[in-house]
Amino acid sequence: MAAKTHFSFLLLLVLFQLFNSGRGQLQLNYYAKSCPKAEEIIKQQVIDLYYEHGNTAVSWLRNLFHDCIVKSCDASLLLETVVGVESEKDSSRSFGMRNFKYVNKIKAAVEKECPLTVSCADIVALSARDGIVMLKGPHIDLKTGRKDSKMSYSNMVEELVPQHNASLVNVLSRFNSIGIDTEATVALLGSHSVGRVHCVNLVERLYPTVDPTIDPEYAKYLKMRCPTP
């Protein structure tokens, strides 16, 4: 099981290195001259936040997916809602996403060392990479040099992020349409073996009657965790 989980993490990170990586030319050690301590600062912040708030590692991984799947890995996910423009993170498909304030904490630590140098897009990517290590996954040598978006693409979120209860055919079709093959899709789905699911995503299989495909003992446990519809 551990090997499979590590493979899922590995394939997920490789996927986002290759696909829609953001504007600009990516390279290893992009900040070697402009901010040589950047990656170490981000790593230490991720470690500190993990031990202070254990669920952050899962948040970093989900942030990366939701950022990259919409247009590119450009930190557009982090933009706040302003008059006339909705934030991507306010979409119903982003339900349950959290810990954005900790991204700001990491950003502040990097800014203190190197003002106006390291993009938020790279912080999202690197924090996910380092979060995976905290979850006992592999370390990936990740290219950097992503540029931050000044635009929100909230109108594309529902089109690109599948519903939690979408059919496998629908999920495969959506991901294949943007160049993610079946093997990579399996890895993306496999990354959900960490973290938690929200009750709102499964109560329809518990109430008014339990879905017969759910193991009865497990259904009892789920109803204990989600006691009402």
Image (cartoon, grey):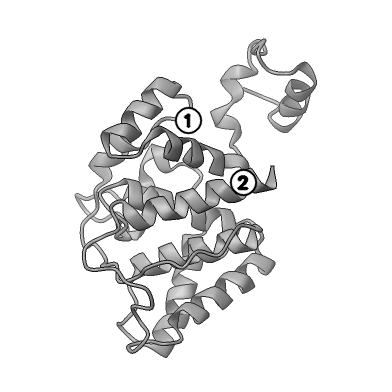
At numbered mark 1, what does the secondary structure look like: helix, strand or loop?
Answer: loop
Residue drawn 48% across the image and 41% down it: 188
Across and down, in percent, residue 5 comes to 61, 46
Residue 15 position within the rendered picture, expressed as x and y whole percent measured from the top left: 39, 50
- Residue farthest to the right, as pictured: 217
Residue drawn 27% across and 48% down?
Answer: 86
Image check: 16 left or right of 70?
Answer: right
Task: Kindly tell me whether residue 98 is visible in this rendering.
Answer: no
Which quadrant: the C terminus? top right
Badge 2: residue crowd in 10 Å (few <14, some 14–19, many ≥20): many
Q: Which residue is mark 1?
A: 164
Nearest to the observer: residue 135 or residue 6 = 6
Label 2 sits on residue: 5
1 and 2 marks in contact (CB < 8 Å):
no
Question: Label 1, label 2: how many angstroms apart (C-alpha)?
Answer: 20 Å
Q: Position of residue 74 (x, y in %)?
A: 29, 60
Q: Badge 1 local density, few (<14 within 10 Å), some, or many (20+)?
A: few
Q: Nearer the viewer, residue 178 or 98?
A: 178
Q: Amino acid at mark 2?
A: Thr
Residue 154, compared with residue 47, is above or below; it is above
Q: Residue at x 49, y 73 (%)?
A: 105
Q: Is label 2 in a helix, a strand or a loop? A: helix
